[in-house]
Amino acid sequence: MTDLLAPPSSARESWPTKQRLVVIGNGMAGARTVEEILSRNGAELFEITMFGDEPYGNYNRIMLSHVLSGEDSEADIFLNSLQWYADNAIDLHAGVRIERIDRFAKVVFGDDGSITPYDQLIIATGSRAFVPPTEGIYRPNGSMLPGVFSFRTLDDTRAMVEYARREDHHRAVVIGGGLLGLEAARGLQTHGVQVDVVHSGKHLMNAQLGRAGGEILRRSMAQLGVGVFTGTRVTEVWGPDRVRGVKLRDLTEIDCDLVVIAAGIRPNTDVATVSGFTVERAIVVDDQLRTVEDPSVFAVGECVQHRGEVYGLVAPLWEQAVVLADQITGANPAARYLGSRTATKLKVAGVEVASMGVAEPERDTDEHIVFSEPSRGVYKSVVVRDGKVIGATLLGDSSKVAFLQQAFDRGLPLPDERVELLFDLGGPTEDVGVAELADDAQVCNCNGVCKSTIVDTVKGGCKTVTGVMDATRAGKGCGSCKGLVAKLVEWAADGAVQEDPSIHWYVPGIPLDKPTLMAEIRERNLRSVAEVFAALAPGGAEDAKSKMGLASLLKMMWGSEAPDDREGRFINDRVHANIQKDGTFSVVPQMRGGVTTPEQLRRIADVAEKYDVPMVKLTGGQRIDLLGIKKEDLPAVWADLDMPSGYAYGKSFRTVKTCVGQEFCRFGTGDSTKLGIELETRLQGMEGPAKMKLAVSGCPRNCAESYVKDVGIVAIEGGRWEIYIGGAAGAHIRKGDLLCTVDDAETAKLLTGRFLQYYRENAKWLERTYAFVPRVGLEHIRAVVVTDSEGIAERLDAEVAKHAENHRDPWQDGKNPASPGQFRASLPLEVLPHVPKNRAEILLGGSW
């Protein structure tokens, strides 16, 4: 370590005027350091100038995978807007790269020709994506082959989304099976792209997980439909004009339209190197984050090497930022950065992962406590040395992470029964763990938020979970700590947690409940999603998570008068079929009430043979599913079937399941089949906040399972019918509530439509009836739907009738595509996993 001069910034009172502080780097470390400086009255001490390569304000790079998947919009991930810089008198040069530092003249040189003097300088240049040497990635002019992307910046993400959405792009290869690679894989899947991950390590996330944990993660990813190749690498990317495939080290070839490189990062040290600073693995700094050569030049973040360590996690960056701010402002000249204990707590592609310290035992005397349940994707491992936790891995269940984190950070004494480290068997429960967390225990690793910050925010008057998250940024990173943040808020508020008004909004991007939103749309005559955002969203900002809900709402309100907003639709809705894990589609022709004819069956059989359908299967809704149809074959399949769509996709009315009723059943008391067919005819194609499944049973024996449907109708003695609403038998199980008993089938049909229309107009986006009915209340719904307490029954009935009259079979798109690429051929298409053409024969064993 260098022989340092006297601390440069401890004598705050000696500064006659503001010093010129220049920060090279506007990423998470640079901006966070400036925030810390400002919080120490830095605005009174410095004239701050910042330079950033990217032409934006500061954003959360960790959340790029959420933007890729559409979970968050670009606006959601910005930490500081351009206005924040102006408000704090920061001179931001966004899009300007600093090429050289003259530390003798104390100036920096920008690639725009600018020369900027400084008194204090902070280098926060972060990292860049590592691109492994691979044949074919780069073209002779130095640019990447079209279709190949690194995954590091907002521009990278935008380009990937645009490319993945193209109609003829169906397969992707992600190079790198670490956190970023797996998140990229899941994000690409949301665009209907089949993804394979190629990882050079022996198992996924080998930097955080041991072999056993990595293998369980591999199984979890496979169950999500992500192909995984480990222990190998991509040696060649090929394609004459754009990427067409990759070749692995063992000569395996994978056809693909898109390659994403997420193989790690490397510190950005170019400007330090050319300017004569000591650079080893990264820019070498001391405990005060000062460079070796110059006490007026600091460095912070991923570009820093401290005591031989280089960090790629967020938490160490935040810790460094605090020390540097203390130093440079003189707020605490004794502050020292002594290194970070690395711990990761995140959600990888929907799978909870927590990792700290070593992943596996290193000495013969190390204790290793392991629990593995591969079928549930759960793996827990704790390594104990000399009675202290030196490492832990939690996969699929992180309920014990709070206690283990404390034990790891503070060396807490451990229970004699080591199994209590993994399960609540007399050890600290999660609630107790929350209460006993030390004040400085870090809750949000992504944003470096500790328990005391959350508690102080609550004590300061903010008593909503989302309000605390907004104020502290806790839970605003990967989101894996949201549950813990909520528990802390509840605990700190001592039972006085307040409700967040946003839970009443129909979609997150528009601060209005559904009735108000619909009233505004009608009053302003808004017909498109873009018009709604422009008129009603704060600042007119578009929100990706809100688009599908708004598109559905507009279609419900305006019917055929609403423009066809394909940007707001998932692939299933764009092609009117259900995408499967291998990139093919399933086609379900309509069979109203589960009734079909021999002629229809012949056509289905002919289509299955003509298009080599690997699987023909009956659905739970009494229909026939043709699985494994290529996208480009969809229009021809529909034409040959010449049957309406069975709506096995989308947030819409699905089907009416029926029993055989009174004509064949010895116990049947009502014509359930006839009523089911009439209902399905009337409601077919009806869009809603969520899917809607119905059933009609001819007697209380309930062979059609009417009690667990969104609407279930049951015939009883005397020609009467019972109507049940809000039932479910999927991931949630709930017996429906009896809405009413009516005297005839016509009234049952009328009230069913009226209830569904009321549900359509008042339920939140994605809210099923099993949640809607308890939330709104059965008595209220009964009053509105049955006794017309609000005087809207006639209008609700008219809306249902209008829908029935204007319904158009979406499969007509096959004759006249809505867009040129709607059903564009997706060649080359190599389906993985390979589903044999005679899948049904194999399963049945030829024994029929």
Image (tube, helix red, strand yellow):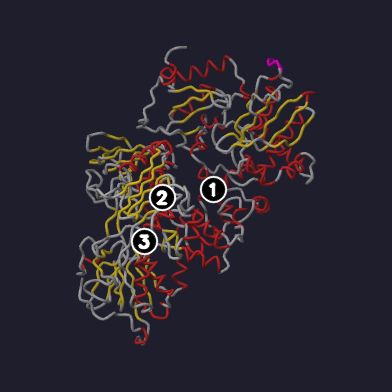
Q: Nearer the viewer, mark 1 or mark 2?
A: 2
- Mark 2: which amino acid? Leu
- Mark 3: which amino acid? Glu
- Label 2, on which residue? 421
Residue 267 locus on image (x, y percent): 27, 59
Q: Is residue 168 above or below residue 30?
A: above
Q: Is residue 108 above or below residue 553?
A: below
Q: Is residue 388 left or right of residue 249?
A: right
The residues bearing labels 1 and 2 have C-alpha atoms spaced at a distance of 44 Å
- Label 1, on which residue? 547
Residue visible at 23% across and 75% down in the picture: 294
- Mark 1: which amino acid? Lys
Q: Quadrant of the N terminus?
A: bottom left
Residue visible at 38% across and 40% down in the picture: 372
Q: Is residue 169 visible?
A: no
> Are there few (<14), some (14-19), or many (20+) residues within 10 Å of tag 2?
many
Q: Is residue 362 above or below residue 98?
A: above
State the SS at label 1. helix
User: Which circle's residue, 2 or 3, is located before the other in the chain?
Assistant: 3
Highlighted magenta segment, given as a residue range: 662-666
